Image (cartoon, helix red, strand yellow):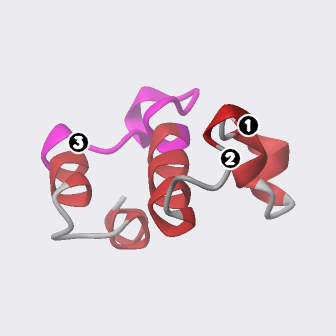
Amino acid sequence: AYVLQENGNLLELVDPKLESNFSNDEAIVMLNLALLCTCHSPSLRPKMSAIVDILEGRSSVQDVLKFE
């Protein structure tokens, strides 16, 4: 997943059964958030409040990265 992220191909992780029945932008946000939440170092993972802000659209993954 990290290699796909580095190469800008995160959407390859989306289940092909979905075909094109999803928002690419939303999928990218969720995939980037999932990678942040599973970071090897717990101290680099976002706080739950930051995750909720992203999921509710009040913040972005980039905003969280600025403050971490």
Three-letter code for the amino acid on which mark 1 is drawn? Pro
User: Mark 1 Cα within 10 Å, few/some/many (few <14, many 20+)?
Assistant: few
Classify mark 2: helix, strand or loop.
Answer: loop
Q: Where's the N terminus, which quadrant? A: top right
Image point (48%, 38%), residue name: 34
Q: From what the image shows, is residue 14 above or below residue 58?
A: above
For discs 1 and 3, the disc positioned in front in the rendered view:
1
Q: Where is residue 20 in the image (x, y as percent from the top left)?
A: 64, 55
Cα gap from disc 3 to disc 2, whole angstroms: 32 Å
Question: Mark 1 sits on what residue?
Answer: 16
Mark with earlier residue (3, 2): 2
Question: Mark 3 sits on what residue?
Answer: 47
Question: Residues in magenta?
Answer: 35-49
Three-letter code for the amino acid on which mark 2 is drawn? Glu
User: Mark 3 Cα within 10 Å, few/some/many (few <14, many 20+)?
Assistant: few
Classify mark 3: helix, strand or loop.
Answer: loop
Q: Position of residue 59 (x, y in %)?
A: 23, 70
Q: From what the image shows, is residue 38 above or below residue 58?
A: above
Q: Is residue 55 left or right of residue 49?
A: right
